[in-house]
Amino acid sequence: MGAKVECPHITFNALTQTSPYPMAIHTREDLKEGKLKGISRLKLSCNLEEFPTEILTLADTLEILDLSGNKLKSLPADISRLTKLKIAFFSDNLFTAYPTELAGCKQLSMIGFKANKITIIPENAFTPALRWLILTDNCISEIPASLGDCPLLQKLMLAGNQLSSLPSSLANCTNLELLRISANQFESLPDWLLTMPRLTWLAFAGNPLNAHLRPQHSLPEITWSSLVIAEQLGEGASGIISRAQWQQEEVAVKVFKGAITSDGLPADEMKACMAIGQHPNLINVIGKVIDHPEDKEGLVFTIIPAHFRNLGGPPNFETCTRDTFPEGTLFSMQDCICILQGMASVLHHLHQQGIVHADFYAHNILIDTTGFPLLSDFGAANFYDTNDKQLSEAIERMEIRAFGCLIDDLTARTDIQEPNTLKLLNRLKTMCMQEEVLQRPTFKQVIDELVALS
């Protein structure tokens, strides 16, 4: 594997877990001594048990606050003095109730409380400016109806809680595009959720509603002792991947951690990888690891040649739900068609088996120098019942919208030497991204359009 393709099976977007910016960790001493005056970004992780009041002296400039990895249980009432605060992270603390004091920070649009002990979220706890809310890995059983009063909400991360329903008022959040409700207690999905005009990336594995659905494929068992583990290639939220030798063949081995991620449970990712079957645009799963010395689960994959690279980069705070690309990125029309045909084919293959990728993004696609694509990272994948016509049609059309986003990403960065082809691709994008869910095409229809276009 090359440097740009460290770990395609566990692509990990840090945006769903911690701060979206690389931030140096500051010291409490520097804060107390006034050495941080005028900064816009503050990160403290030093076993804090109380909110440092000195932070409030930064009110004129502070925009990003990261107090993850402490022992905080509450926030001061006058935190609203931080009038310029836009991003706040309190992950890995000891909150048991969501602090309503944050509602006084009127510009606060991104909030993270991953891995606390929250059981209660009072009504009117959020500011209408909210775009991105992370409540992964808590003990929440009910979402307040007032969340529906956040019209700008685009990302909502609720995996690993005790939810069995969502407030119907959430249907008012018509800008919602990414929703993670994996590893909860849902017996079904509400009908209104399946009609939301922009919902594109929905992860719901690990709930009673799909507990009866199982992989249709079995994998060969590969003993841990038969693997000669070499260097670590990468680490993500759900596991560690290493280079290895197996029967004189170079392979990649992923060992799952078992902890909840923002996408859901690693066990569900493993089930999806076992079920995807064979396809030219998939990374081949060779077998399942058994007899791990620490009783961990793992999979063995075909290793990816070094000349493959990630098609795009993950979203940042500004783009929120859309991928990023280096300045000057330009795709040939031939590459665009090759990428789109390969991805439409592999997604059709998955949906025929009742599997939705649920994280279909350019940053989870690998391409070689010819534009040949591979789809990776099944951390958010779900099984769904293809016999449920209403559900299956809506789920496929959600992923069709994600495909439309990919068309948009590519056509915005392609040459215009073939204006007729570009015009036809833009027409297909419009079809895929229209807000009436069931009016979008199926993947079979998309494939036919692309074949006719090429």
Image (cartoon, rainbow, N blue to C red):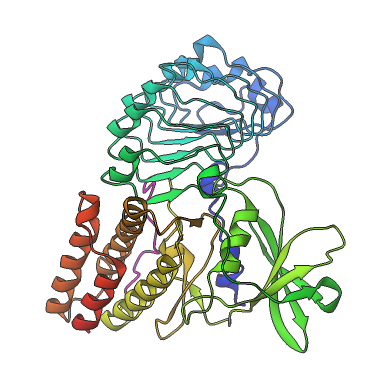
> Which quadrant, please, contains the C terminus?
bottom left
Q: Is residue 51 above or below residue 197?
A: above
Residue 82: % across, % down: 46, 20
Q: Main secondary structure of the magenta part?
A: loop
Residue 402: % across, % down: 34, 58
Q: Is residue 313 magenta?
A: no
Residue 424: % across, % down: 15, 73
Q: Is residue 323 magenta?
A: yes
Residue at the image position 36 percent from the left and 56 percent from the top: 392
Q: Is residue 312 visible?
A: no
Which residue is outermost to the bottom? Answer: 248
Q: Is residue 198 above or below residue 397?
A: above
> Which quadrant, please, contains the N terminus?
bottom right
What range is drawn magenta here?
Answer: 317-330
Snapshot quadrant of residue 131 = top left
Snapshot quadrant of residue 304 = bottom right
Horizontally, residue 307 falls left or right of residue 350, namely right
Residue at the image position 61 percent from the left and 22 percent from the top: 34
Horizontally, residue 117 falls left or right of residue 76, namely right
